[in-house]
Image: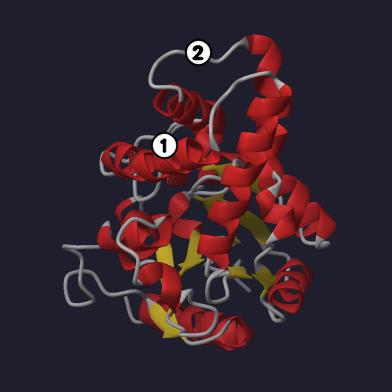
Amino acid sequence: MSSPRIKAVSFDLWETLLLETDGADRRRSAARCRSLSEAFAALSLNIPLEDVVRAHEASASWLASVWEKNEEVTHLDQVRFILREASKGAVSLRPEWMGQLTEAYVSPLFKEPPRLDAEAAPTLAWLRDQGKRVGLISNVGRTPGVALRRFLAKEGLSGFFDAMLFSDEVRVRKPSREIFQMAAEKLGVAPAEILHVGDNLKADVWGARNAGMKAVLLSSEAGRDREAEADPSSLVSISRRLEAGITASAIAPDATITKLGVLAQALSRLEETWAKAKSLR
């Protein structure tokens, strides 16, 4: 009996394994501004909260301009931008402040946490039981990979993954081919033997297919933060706008599912279809 066509499955994180609720992005942004303002005050920096909020909002446009090129910056770059804008160029980030400001910047993830999809752990466990290697390929927003690793460990999910790639750590974003190739190398399998699952047609489906992988589109309304999507300055809204120009007719996923719980059936059907096609050659 021949080995399975798919040897590894990789996942997107946001709106695939982690789901937002209405208003979460707005509440997290407000908490981040408050935390930064308090941290600045503790460092004897006289920067009013309203200036921190203004700088935080201004950073969204800057981040969008970076992400449009599939490039990435670190959370410290983001803090540096906000500090410079909020202080009107009067204060520069010092190395000894980094730990304190990092904690202030990432703590809102734990104060306003996303919701773990109830089907995430069972799906990942099933894949491991089937002998599949499992990966995570995630673009980050304002929360860096180091904090997301902590969160996934707290939720009991990190142990399922053989490899986790976060865009701020590898300095390139989906849909760039490079991040998918890095994942294939870490998983130890060829790109053609990987099935990637995600909710974004451009970043996940087009990106994975362009890197030589198979792709499943998770098309679900559950967990979407409609309030953030309606706000043009939110990172959720910016991420959606970056999907522009890629349509389902331009590059179709190998399968579309509406919830993680049916991935096992979808994968089985795909492998059966590919096996039949191979036998007819």
Which secondary structure lies at badge 1?
helix
Quadrant of the drawing holding the C terminus = bottom left
Q: Can residue 1 be seen here? A: yes
Percent across and percent down for residue 140 are: 51, 47
**Residue found 83% across the figure and 56% down from its top:** 154
How many numbered discs? 2
Q: Can residue 187 be seen here? A: no
Residue 131 in the figure: left or right of residue 268: right
| Mark with earlier residue (1, 2) | 1
| Residue at numbered disc 2 | 92
* Three-letter code for the amino acid on which mark 2 is drawn: Ser
- Specify the quadrant of the image occupied by residue 267: bottom right
**Residue found 32% across the figure and 41% down from its top:** 70
How far separated are the C-alphas under marks 1 and 2? 14 Å
| Residue at numbered disc 1 | 55
Percent across and percent down for residue 18 are: 62, 67
Q: Does 150 sit above or below residue 205?
A: above
Percent across and percent down for residue 13 are: 57, 60
- Specify the quadrant of the image occupied by residue 45: top right
Q: Does 120 sit above or below residue 37?
A: below
